[in-house]
Image (spheres, grey):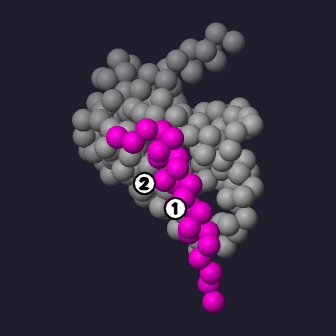
């Protein structure tokens, strides 16, 4: 039990170090030596847990996805779709540091969109009215990329719109996109 806690604490230190470094410079310029110095741990410890920086980044993204999924699963909706979407966006706002770092960095675009793909998938499950509109894979892809880009802009702008305003904007954009017919 203690070893597991120690392992998790060590991994947390490495994840935190990488996130902090990514706020200062591009991911591809960050060395393992810098990560270890920032975490105040040695390289041997790093290699016990990760093979390289990319694996550490993958761990960060996986943890974010797990935490986000867990949070979204805990949302129970007695409100309307806008209320549910607002709760999703509030979570992003509450975790702004990691979202800002991952979305603002020069990471692979697939990593960025995958983060929001999970959110859209959860919205489909919790908002049946929206789900029926995004059955088409082209529309779904458009909504996934579009929502990810709009949310990234919102993050970059320092959350300049209130959460409910952003929820309304995204919902209406999705609703309009879902009405497009392919002939």
Q: Residue at x 75, y 37 (%)?
A: 78
Magenta part, dominant SS = helix
Q: Is residue 111 above or below residue 146?
A: above
Q: Is residue 51 among what the camera can see? A: no
Q: Is residue 164 among what the camera can see? A: yes
Q: Residue at x 69, y 12 (%)?
A: 1
Residue topped by disc 2: 150
Dot 2 surroundings within 10 Å: few (below 14), some, or many (20 or more)? some
In this view of the protein, which residue sits in the foreground, 183 or 111?
A: 183
Q: Are marks 2 and 1 in contact (CB under 8 Å)?
A: yes
Looking at the rendering, the stretch of residues picked out in magenta corresponds to: 160-183
Dot 1 surroundings within 10 Å: few (below 14), some, or many (20 or more)? some
Task: List x then y, in percent, for residue 77.
Answer: 73, 38
Residue found at the far bottom of this picture: 183
Which quadrant does the C terminus fall into? bottom right
Residue topped by disc 1: 173
Q: Is residue 70 above or below residue 168?
A: above
Task: List x then y, in percent, for residue 128.
Answer: 75, 55
Task: List x then y, in percent, for residue 114.
Answer: 54, 53
Indicate whether residue 177 is drawn in magenta: yes
What distance separates the C-alpha of mark 2 from that of mark 1?
10 Å
């Amino acid at each position: 039990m203690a070893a597991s806690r120690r392992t998790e604490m060590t991994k947390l230190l490495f994840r935190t170090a990488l996130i902090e470094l990514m706020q200062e410079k591009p991911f591809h310029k960050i060395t393992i030596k810098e990560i270890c110095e920032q975490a105040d741990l040695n390289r041997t410890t790093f290699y016990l847990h990760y093979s390289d920086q990319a694996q550490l980044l993958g761990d960060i993204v996986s943890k974010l996805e797990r935490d986000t999924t867990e949070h979204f699963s805990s949302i129970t909706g007695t409100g309307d779709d806008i209320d549910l979407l607002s709760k999703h966006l509030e979570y992003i706002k509450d975790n702004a540091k990691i979202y800002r770092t991952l979305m603002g960095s020069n990471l692979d675009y697939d990593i960025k969109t995958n983060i929001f793909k999970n959110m859209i998938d959860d919205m489909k499950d919790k908002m049946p009215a929206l789900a029926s509109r995004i059955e088409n894979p082209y529309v779904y892809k458009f909504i996934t990329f579009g929502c990810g880009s709009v949310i990234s802009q919102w993050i970059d702008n320092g959350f300049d719109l209130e959460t409910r305003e952003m929820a309304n904007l995204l919902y209406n954009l999705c609703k309009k996109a879902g009405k497009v017919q392919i002939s």
